[in-house]
Amino acid sequence: RSKRVFDSPVKEGRVHYQMKKKLFSVLAILVCASSIAMAKVPLNEAVLGGIYPGMPVQDMVQIYGDPIKEEVSYAAGIQVYDQKMHYGDSVYLYAHSDSPSGPFKIVMINITANNGFATPAGIHVGSTRADVIKAYGQPDIRFAPNHPELWYKPGNGLDMVFRIKNGVVTRIGLGWNS
């Protein structure tokens, strides 16, 4: 003789409702997770003035000449050698290497003036907030509506951050932990 799982049609209906509710919740989470994981900014847009994270410093020097270099220091927390460089007072670059003598690769680029450095879409310091959103859509990481930064995630763990003041881009950061 088989046992009845449900004592009444009411309990059976409640169990089916709860199962549907759980299934819907799981599907909603999967849909949200997939939309978060997909970057709207293509990886080939993660370039500033022809420089991109992962680029060997020697390649950058062939384009722009020698930067002003600061001392190489050892970053014990991440166990790499860190080199800070800059061109003038508006282009700051950081590079890492496993050895104090290199080769170093670019890990972060910061631009703080309208100096000719731009993304492939033409966004530069001096572009408007509307220009950035038109080029890249709404930011991947959202803060309050008037937050001074627009954060995008082009992929490979990169951040592309546009600092906004009075509706205008005042700084662009590109790299790991921009």
Image (cartoon, rainbow, N blue to C red):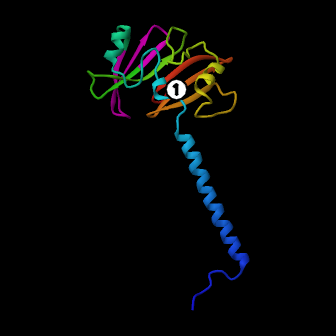
Is 74 one of the magenta-colored residues?
Answer: yes
> Residue 61's quadrant in the figure?
top left
Question: Residue pushed farthest bottom?
Answer: 1
Q: Nearer the viewer, residue 159 or 102?
A: 159
Label 1 amino acid? Met
User: Taking 131 as reference, is 10 left or right?
Assistant: right
Q: Is 91 placed above or below 22 here?
A: above
Secondary element type, mark 1: strand
Q: Is 36 placed above or below 12 here?
A: above
Specify the quadrant that holds the N terminus.
Answer: bottom right
> Residue 58's quadrant in the figure?
top left
Q: Is 46 placed above or below 92 here?
A: below
User: Taking 12 as reference, is 57 left or right?
Assistant: left
Q: Nearer the viewer, residue 69 or 55?
A: 55
Query: What secondary structure prevails in the magenta region?
Result: strand
Question: Residue pushed farthest front?
Answer: 1
Q: What x and y, as percent, mark residue 70? A: 37, 15
Q: What x and y, as percent, mark residue 33? A: 55, 46
Name which residue lies at 54% across and 11% down. 113
Q: Nearer the viewer, residue 148 or 160?
A: 160
Q: Which residue is mark 1?
A: 160
Estimate how packed mark 1 is, as few (under 14), some (14 to 19) or many (20 or more) residues with alpha carbons within 10 Å: many
Q: What x and y, as percent, mark residue 108? A: 44, 23
**What is the total number of numbered labels drawn onto the structure image?**
1
Is 96 one of the magenta-colored residues?
Answer: no
Name which residue lies at 62% across and 51% down. 28
> Residue 87's quadrant in the figure?
top left
Q: Nearer the viewer, residue 160 or 16?
A: 16
Name which residue lies at 62% across and 30% down. 138
Name which residue lies at 33% across and 33% down. 79
Which residues make up the magenta segment? 70-93
